[in-house]
Amino acid sequence: MSVQNIPAATCRLAVAIIATGLLAPAALAADEGKLTLSAGVDFSSGDYGSNTDTEVWYLPLTAKYELGRSIFKLTMPYLRVSGPSGCVIIDGRPVCDASGAASSEEGLGDVVLGYSYSLMPKPVAGFFIDLGGKVKLGTADEDKGLGTGKNDYSVQADVYYLAGQFTPFATLGYRFMGDPAGYDFNDTWFGSLGLAYKLANQNSVGALWDLRQKLTNDGEGANELMLYWSHNFAAGYKLQTYAVAGFSDASPDYGLGVMLQMSTQK
């Protein structure tokens, strides 16, 4: 397979969850514990530097548990990929061979485990800082191209500034890639800049700019912009929608997503 372009180091859907209402740092979690369950649909399409578009349907189930200053996360996705044969999916992004015949594959994706901890119980001059890490388990079917079959590990820092209705936030992290047979991925830096704005009537909107280093020397880094809207319903339910535009061959031409969340606390 011709490795031309490597996808983003972290699936944008996970970032979307943080940006659209799970933005509050771990320090704001209830001491008795809070469980949030989420289900979503994410669609993206792009040529990723090849001659044929690849379409990816990504359907994640996510459980998040907050206790004190800690947040634990588990994400289990289901994937359907249509495009040139020989593609491999990394965090919802395909790497494709331009000469491959059209094919479709589907199945369970890579399970992701995450943990974050807030360094402060209360904001300091309006700032919160969270430190965390993630493990992407190589559980997806490597033969179908739904994953690499290897584990990846990442660490990151998240900074939030609480300014009334506005909440600027930023992420900086580093990812250690597992190398399947035939690949030599680079360990990479990744980062995000975003702004959330709380509207009236339980609505919020915002934007997120996401960047990733290239994972191979002849590839490209990811460069994406996401716009989102979310609405809080009664009884702890939340609906989130977003749209994504990509500006590099490692990003989709466009993407759309929706997610429904249910929390044990309102």
Image (tube, helix red, strand yellow):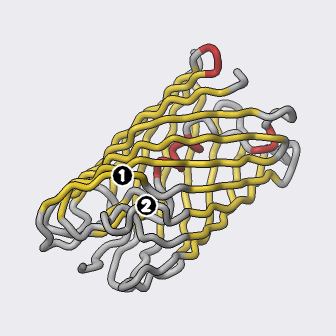
Image point (73%, 44%), residue name: 25
**Residue 17 x %, y %:** 55, 42
Image point (71%, 59%), residue name: 132
Is 193 situated left or right of 223 in this image? right
Is 229 situated left or right of 195 in this image? left
Image point (55%, 63%), residue name: 136
Q: Which residue is mark 2?
A: 140
Packing grade of label 1 (10 A; few <14, some 14-19, many >=20) is some
Q: Quadrant of the C terminus?
A: top right
- Give the amino acid type for the residue marked by disc 1 in the picture: Gly
For the residues labelled 1 and 2, say whether their Cβ atoms are less than 8 Å apart: yes
Residue 63 image-quadrant placement? top right
Tell which of 172 and 38 is nearer to you.
38
- Give the amino acid type for the residue marked by disc 2 in the picture: Ala
Residue 33 image-quadrant placement? top right
How much space separates mark 1 and mark 2, taking CA atoms? 8 Å
Q: Secondary structure at mark 1?
A: strand
**Residue 73 x %, y %:** 65, 48
Q: Earlier in the sequence, mark 1 or mark 2?
A: 1
Q: Quadrant of the N terminus?
A: bottom left
Q: Secondary structure at mark 2?
A: loop
Q: Which residue is mark 1?
A: 107
**Residue 45 x %, y %:** 26, 51
